[in-house]
Image (spheres, rainbow, N blue to C red):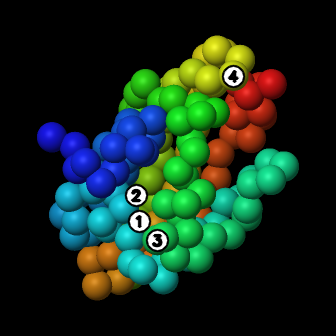
Amino acid sequence: MREPAYAAFSALDPFFDIVMRGLAGLVDGDHYFDTIAADAVFEFRYRFPGYPTKVVGREALMALYSGYGEGMTLQGADALVVNISQTPGVVILEYDVQGNAAGSGKLYENRFISVVTIKDRKIVGWRDYMDSLAAMSALT
């Protein structure tokens, strides 16, 4: 059963699920947002008009993701590869997501690499890389 507090973020459920699988046993929390330290730093290594390249804090990340379903809804996520870095506390997740852009109805398929830094069983850092063209093509 989904946590009611996170129902507004259901358009991202496949992303949350694949990340939780990838970080199973490494972080504490039942939902993706529960695994994030209050002062975590998120870097997005892609540029979109109006989208930040850096967000600091769990609350700021939740605010950023709060309108996700208005533009995109994910239907699935797969092709998970988990790489444990030689750097202590760093995990590299590779995964694919599929969905539809709300405005255009176009199919959205993208590949991600997320470099996740964990300390005291919480996410404290996240660097995200994706195929920017795939996202822009779906949204236009």
Amino acid, disc 3: Arg
Q: Is residue 48 above or below residue 55?
A: above
Could you tell which of marks 4 and 3 lies nearer the N-terminus?
A: 3
Amino acid, disc 2: Asn
Q: Is residue 43 above or below residue 89?
A: above
Q: Which residue is mark 1?
A: 91
Coordinates of residue 140 in the picture (x, y in percent): 80, 25
Viewer-side label of 1, 2: 1
Label 3: element kind: helix
Q: Which residue is mark 4?
A: 103
Which residue is drawn at the image coordinates 74% and 41% (left, top)?
132
Q: Quadrant of residue 31?
A: bottom left
Amino acid, disc 4: Gly
Viewer-side label of 1, 3: 3
Camera-side residue: 65 or 86? Answer: 65
Instruction: Give the left or right position of residue 136, taking residue 97 as reference.
Output: right
Instruction: Give the left or right position of residue 113, taking residue 21 as reference.
Output: right
Residue 83 circle label: 2
Q: CA distance from mark 2 to mark 3?
A: 24 Å
Dot 4 crowding, Cα within 10 Å, few <14, some 14–19, many 20+: few
Q: Is residue 28 above or below residue 76?
A: below
Coordinates of residue 65 in the picture (x, y in percent): 54, 52
Q: Which residue is mark 3?
A: 58
Q: CA distance from mark 4 to mark 3?
A: 28 Å
Q: Are marks 4 and 1 in contact (CB under 8 Å)?
A: no
Coordinates of residue 50 in the picture (x, y in percent): 80, 53
Dot 2 crowding, Cα within 10 Å, few <14, some 14–19, many 20+: few
Q: Are marks 1 and 2 in contact (CB under 8 Å)?
A: yes
Which residue is drawn at the image coordinates 57% and 21% (left, top)?
100
Could you tell which of marks 4 and 1 lies nearer the N-terminus?
A: 1
Q: CA distance from mark 2 to mark 4?
A: 35 Å
